[in-house]
């Protein structure tokens, strides 16, 4: 069964460093997402991506964050200068959307990358 | 802004007892509501969605627009139901582009 895969599973970085979190969405999916979950808190939407551009982003997704689909398979989240409060589990998800029908199709999640900023 | 409320952080019931996990949402046009489950050391996965009105692993959830609720229920809990359960609301603008708004989650523990 196809899965969303994320690498690495755990990333430790120093404050101020840049990190890139990688995701391989399910191959025939068109919409891609990043979510994060700070320890003990809820899962929060960061950004959605469709047709090689950001479709929607939350207030959390400020100028320190960027997303990219550098090739036909990878979807990356970059944090330019990490802060302690960026420590969280980051989940990638993808869905096979059906534009125009008003139906929200199922989002499939990766296992997550635990980012620890020290 | 959309808001999803799960009032119980932890719910512990005995095996065979009924389970109800509460979820309330903020009204936003035509809400699309989901329950996601995360078993220990596994990824988030969709349990059910209101639009399909199906029962998965014995769980059901009915959308009550009057009470803006989407409570998850199961008549007889099983030990393998122990997990984190997240209620989520999808965007109402269509096209599937909007992100999900999650509740804080309820940790369900089924005691033998």
Image (tube, coloured by chain):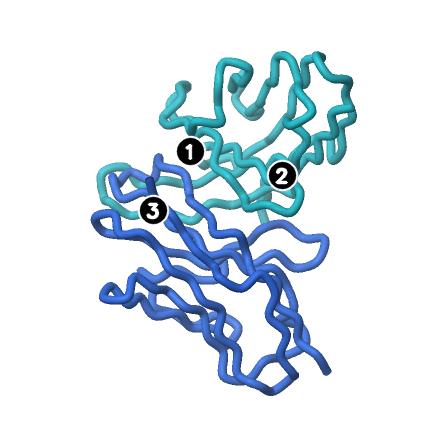
Residues flagged by tags 2 and 3 on a common chain: yes
Say if mark 2 contacts mark 3, CB within 8 Å.
no
Residue sitting nearer the eye, A15 or B32: A15
Q: Earlier in the sequence, mark 3 or mark 1?
A: 1
Q: Residues within 10 Å of mark 3 (few under 14, many from 20)?
A: many
Circle 2 or circle 1, nearest the eye: 2
Q: Which mark is residue A38?
A: 2
Mark 3, residue position: A104
Q: Measuring 65% from the left and 43% from the top, which residue is drawn there?
A: A111
> Which color is chain A depicted in?
cyan
Q: Residue A43 appears at what percent x and percent y?
A: 54, 43
Q: Quadrant of the N terminus of chain B?
A: top left
Q: Quadrant of the C terminus of chain B?
A: bottom right
Mark 1, residue position: A31
**CA distance separating discs 2 and 3:** 25 Å
**Callout 1: helix, strand or loop?**
strand
In the image, residue A99 above or below residue A21:
below
Say if mark 3 contacts mark 1, CB within 8 Å.
no
Q: Residue B50 appears at what percent x and percent y?
A: 34, 62
Circle 2 or circle 3, nearest the eye: 2
Q: Residues within 10 Å of mark 1 (few under 14, many from 20)?
A: many
Q: Measuring 60% from the left and 59% from the top, which residue is drawn there?
A: B84
Q: Is residue A15 left or right of residue A3?
A: right
Say if mark 2 contacts mark 1, CB within 8 Å.
no
> Which color is chain B depicted in?
blue
Residue sitting nearer the eye, A71 or B11: B11
**CA distance separating discs 3 and 1:** 11 Å
Q: Measuring 52% from the left and 32% from the top, which residue is drawn there?
A: A34
């Amino acid at each position: 069964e196809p899965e969303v895969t994320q690498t690495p599973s755990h990333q430790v970085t120093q404050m101020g460093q840049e990190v890139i979190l990688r995701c391989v969405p399910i191959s025939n999916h068109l919409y891609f997402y990043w979510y994060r979950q700070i320890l003990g808190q809820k899962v929060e939407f960061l950004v959605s991506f469709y047709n090689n551009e950001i479709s929607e982003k939350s207030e959390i997704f400020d100028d320190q964050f960027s997303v990219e689909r550098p090739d036909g398979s990878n979807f990356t989240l970059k944090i330019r200068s990490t802060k302690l409060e960026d420590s969280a589990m980051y989940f990638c998800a993808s869905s096979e959307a059906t534009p125009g029908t008003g139906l929200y199709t199922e989002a499939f999640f990766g296992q997550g990358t635990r980012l620890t900023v020290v | 802004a959309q808001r999803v409320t799960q009032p119980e952080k932890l719910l512990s019931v005995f095996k065979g007892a009924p389970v109800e996990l509460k979820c309330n949402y903020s009204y936003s046009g035509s809400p699309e509501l989901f329950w996601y489950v995360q078993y220990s050391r596994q990824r988030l996965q969709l349990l059910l969605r209101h639009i399909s009105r199906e029962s998965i692993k014995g769980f059901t959830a009915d959308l009550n627009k009057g009470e803006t609720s989407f409570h998850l229920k199961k008549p007889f809990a099983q030990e393998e139901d122990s997990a984190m359960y997240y209620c989520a609301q999808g965007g109402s603008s269509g096209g599937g582009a909007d992100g999900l708004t999650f509740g804080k989650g309820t940790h369900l523990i089924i005691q033998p």
